[in-house]
Image (cartoon, helix red, strand yellow):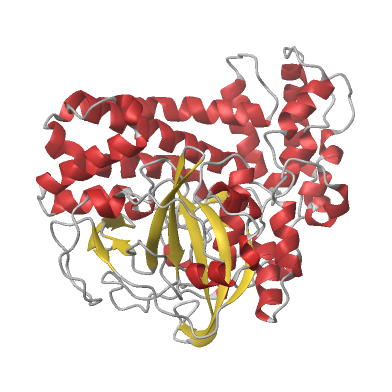
Amino acid sequence: MTLQLNIKDKFNKELPADPLESNTRRQVRNACFSYVMPKKPSNPSLIHVSPEMAKAIGLSDAGESKDFLEVFSGTRVMKGTKPYAMCYGGHQFGNWAGQLGDGRAINLAEVEHEGKNWALQLKGAGETPYSRTADGLAVLRSSIREYLCSEAMHHLGIPTTRALSLVLSGDRVMRDMLYDGNPAYEKGAIVCRVAPSFIRFGNFEILAAQQDVKTLKTLVDFTLTHHYPHLGKPSKEVYLAFFKEVAVRSLEMVMHWQRVGFVHGVMNTDNMSILGLTIDYGPYGWLEGYDHGWTPNTTDNAHKRYRYGTQPQVVLWNLLKLANALYPLIEEVEPLQTILSEYQDEMPKAYLNMMKSKLGLFEVDVNDEALVADLEAILQRSETDMTIFFRELASFKKADDSDGLNLVGDAFYDLDGITGEIAKTWEAWFAIYRARLQKERLNDAERAEAMNSINPKYVLRNYMAQLAIDAADKGEYTLLDDFFNLLKKPYDEQHEHQKWFAKRPEWARNKVGCSMLSCSS
């Protein structure tokens, strides 16, 4: 069976290509991409397909076909398509890194279905001109994490790239998981990522750094035409409106991250989507204990630049770098600075509103900021599971004098340690919270329903992903499928899966993959 996809390539048809087609490492100029062919895996086998995404791109029951496996393992290129790797640069951990590009991602094609455009991209399908010293491959471990998390994020209501399929390559891939001088062979894998576009801040940055204003304008105009058509024909005013909308979308995205306790781990400008999507699932993690200073990325351990609490501020810093890249088309600092200032003004308001929604507070009260700040302070005084705390808080009764601490007791890693002064602080906070709830028009049941639609019951906890990885490494994929389906309905009770509504087990506290990760994938 031949895959019946409505191929509508635009990026590699309308933008300038690297004239060299040899797959050799090089600096690329005056181009947005380089043509490259995927590496054929030795013995590919299909592990999992997202039926939802298969349908979204116009396929049904395709996962069973040989044709599907061949195309989405990189074994065979679809007729009439010409795969490519994007050229981009970026600021990594605050420093300009120069040319980066798709070092292990190869774009197969763009398809249109039911009025939507989808770019299909293989991650782990071999080296490209942008691979630098790496092999362009990916391992099963990191591929499972990306596959599960990108789909889980979508069902949490968070803007994100998606995942279509997960394939085992049949090849062994050498990786030094923690960069500690102990490399080992792991199973190779390939994920097909799907998004309206994979254009990043870094695509614009590299052209500005090269002072290639002509190609920069071509790329910006292309992005406007295909992804922001509602803004109108390209002009200085439209470029500013474009930057403003990117800022608004990026703020919305990062507030969702804060809402569910997602920590991206490597928020470099080359990992920022121009569409405001969560992109590049590398050393990410989910807050277990509520901690503004936590990052899962071992590479960032010393300075914790990308820790949970600073993510909204990092987005602003990244937007500043995008503004610098767009400046040659606008040639005025003030309107760009105004947009950045608006983000800075909106950020605390958006954060307060998000936190209030987690607490079931929808009326206006001048003391809400203090109430939230006091809660965040006490949550970090003793190890408290974020997901469980906010989920259980939905059952709080505003007319009941029962003990709030007991209600959320399951969220504490050491409930017996909540005594003395810290217990009194908690009791005082619950008393203020109960008084504040009296001003809400919603009754307890209505408020609980609202809170439970904002505070998920199930997220892809770090140890859960690791359990799926450990099982898959033995050829057992049941747990992966269980998590894939569980996380489709993260706000539902799903009582049959109650065991996953639990704190991180003690064995996972310091286990690699559960508490610390690296960019090695």
Q: Is residue 369 left or right of residue 315?
A: right
Q: Which residue is at the front of the view, 58 or 156?
A: 58
Q: Residue at x 20, y 54 (%)?
A: 206
Residue 343: percent from left, percent from top:
37, 29
Q: Is residue 91 left or right of residue 302?
A: left
Q: How many marks?
A: 0
Residue 352: percent from left, percent from top:
55, 27
Residue 261 visible to an observer of this rendering? no
Q: Is residue 407 above or below residue 212?
A: above
Q: Is residue 69 above or below residue 223?
A: below
Q: Which residue is at the front of the view, 66 or 407?
A: 66
Q: Is residue 83 left or right of residue 140?
A: left
Q: Which residue is at the front of the view, 339 or 110?
A: 110
Residue 19: percent from left, percent from top:
15, 65
Q: Is residue 147 above or below residue 407?
A: below
Residue 442 visible to an observer of this rendering? yes
- Asked which quadrant contains residue 240, the reply is top left
